Image: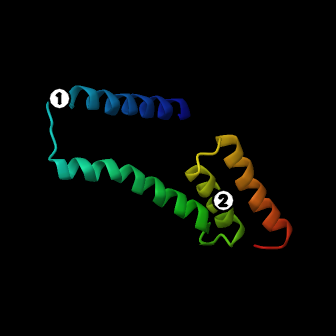
Amino acid sequence: MVIAGILILAVGTFGFRLSGRLLKARISFPPRARKLLESAAVVLLAALVAVSALTQGHSAAGVARPAGVAVAGLLAWRKAPFLVIVLAAAGTTAALRLCGVP
């Protein structure tokens, strides 16, 4: 059952990607719609990060996790290497939790 689900998702994903390439020349969007579609991916990713960083289950995540995400965001904005970003974010969160910050 799991393998069937994986195969269905794989075929669906491939179909969506293929349809984008095939229909790109046939469908044109107005410039305003194109600009909105370009920024939609960034907004969706930011919303996902916010929900993941600020909540844990059905309650707030405390202070340590959002602080780690903020450190990661700052380092990503400064174009730090990915490994440095991950280690700094994890270290910040761990240090705050070690100090008793929820």
- The residue tagged with tag 1: helix, strand or loop? loop
Q: Residue at x 62, y 62 (%)?
A: 70
Q: Which residue is mark 2?
A: 71
- Of 22 and 94, nearer the camera is 94
Q: Residue at x 63, y 59 (%)?
A: 69
Identified by mark 1, the residue type is Ala
Q: 23 above or below 36?
A: above
Q: Earlier in the sequence, mark 1 or mark 2?
A: 1
Identified by mark 2, the residue type is Val
The spot of residue 95 in percent (x, y) is 82, 63
98 vs 69, left or right, is right
Q: Which residue is mark 1?
A: 25
Label 2 neighbour load within 10 Å: few <14, some 14-19, many 20+: many
Q: Nearer the viewer, mark 1 or mark 2?
A: 2
84 vs 53, left or right, is right
Q: Residue at x 40, y 57 (%)?
A: 43
